[in-house]
Amino acid sequence: MFVRTPVILLGSLSLFACASQPSVVPVMDLAPAYASAALDNGGLRVAPLDQAWWRSFDDPVLNRLVDEALLGNLDIETAAARLQQAAGALRVAASNLLPSATVGASASTQRQSLDDPMARIASAFPDYDRTNSLYGLSTAASWELDVFGRLAAARRATGADQAAALADIDGARLSVAAEIATAYITARELQARVAIAEARVQTSERVRGLVALRFDEGSASRFEVDQADADLSASRATLPLVEAGLDATLNRIDLLSGRTPGHAAALLGRGDIPAALSVAVEDGPADLLVRRPDIVAAERRLAAADARVAEALTAYYPRLTVQGLVGFLSSGLSGLISDDTLQAAGSAGLSGRLFDFGATRGGVEAARGRTREAAAGYRSTVLRAVAEAEDGFSRLARGNRHALELEQSQAALTRASATARTAYDLGGLSLKDALDVQRRLLEVEDAAITAKAEASRASVGLFRVLGGGWTAGQLQTDVPDCPKTTPATQEGTARCNA
């Protein structure tokens, strides 16, 4: 009866501590399909959602820029360093489950003072030697028996941390590829806008020359000359701003690639804006739970926090440790290893808290609070991902339709501009009207370029928010299975195998 009472008491305390723990599994109510996916996008070419999604744009320069950025980006390097730290922590946690052993050797020499009372007595014997030597060789082992699952919970937590860090790397790679593609499209847009601005300057210069010639001939007024001068200055004023934006975008590409500015400018050359693409999607928002690295990382961090609740709960229970030592101790090296010098010891210790004035309970509540925070973070990440996906479909569909309308407007104004120029040359149209048509054409051309680029950027954004073809099944990490349920691990194992 004396032996069984503590066991019953511990079991009662365990059940009491875990009796009313809420579930940490977030319940997400997601729609079966994307509402915005059914919008008319103007007949865009459909591209598959795979890991090398940027290759669907069929642009060799873009492919090279992304490949270089994935090798040199410092955010990816930072994420890789965090994974290394998490892997080291997991190795430490796994080793704590196993016995540890140390080996040691010692040698000491002591010369005893004759003023020592014991030395005075010992010196009366003929074989007394003031100098003593002692040599030792020993092996010691210790092992904490994980009776209540503390070490197993710690290992589950660090395993989940490692899985989250691995997902963070893939998330960083996805973000870098998307940012490079977005910056590349912007660079092509600004190159086209620089060409339009230069063409506008050239057109304004020709008009200014023509007006000046007519003014000299007396067929144009000073007002028309001033108007042509103003239009020329306005055209020239636009060009530096667009060129500055292009320089900043090229520098952004180099920064994302981990290089000093200058490389992207030499590599890009001239080229067209990649055409916008639609993305093939067969599943609904629920698919994001395994296709978005940030969602998987958030879920793994929730699992880690949950496991640490189980670890905190084990502070209510004692720890059982066994230790052993085997070695040799001798006054001389020649006879160090022998049966006479052999010494051995073994022990088992049970230690636990008698009272701690609420420290253990505080640790458990803190762990539960972190789990609650992680659960809220997970829900927020999922909801944000779904909203981003819906926005991505909407931006792509409506943005491409906007670009198509501007292309039609541009074509109509191109015809109108040619007609107006002919009418002006024949004297059937005033300079003001001719300039208005030309100005509207250039404005629409500029807007059409921006709209086309925006539609392409929307394609990149959609690839990104849908996970870029990544799946959670790619995670390769040592996450141990849940241990057998004990009173101390009833809470904290809800998601260890999720």
Image (tube, rainbow, N blue to C red):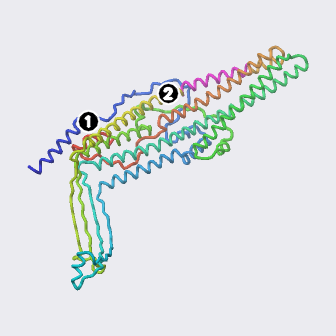
* Residue shown at 90% from the left, 17% from the top: 218
Q: Amino acid at mark 2?
A: Asp
Tag count: 2
Q: Amino acid at mark 1?
A: Gln
Residue bounds of the magenta highlight: 396-416
* Residue shown at 24% from the left, 51% from the top: 319
Please, is residue 38 above or below residue 493 in the view?
above
> Which quadrant would residue 368 be assigned to in this image?
top left
> Residue 298: image x %, image y %?
40, 38
Residue at the limit of the structure toward the left, as seen here:
1
The residue that label 1 is drawn on is 21
Front-most of residues 123 and 6: 123
* SS of the residue under disc 2: helix
* SS of the residue under disc 1: loop
Residue at the limit of the structure toward the bottom, as seen here:
126
Residue 391: image tag = 2
> Which quadrant would residue 335 be assigned to in this image?
bottom left
> Residue 114: image x %, image y %?
28, 78
Q: Is residue 86 left or right of residue 335?
A: right
* Residue shown at 33% from the left, 53% from the top: 94
Chief secondary structure of the magenta span?
A: helix
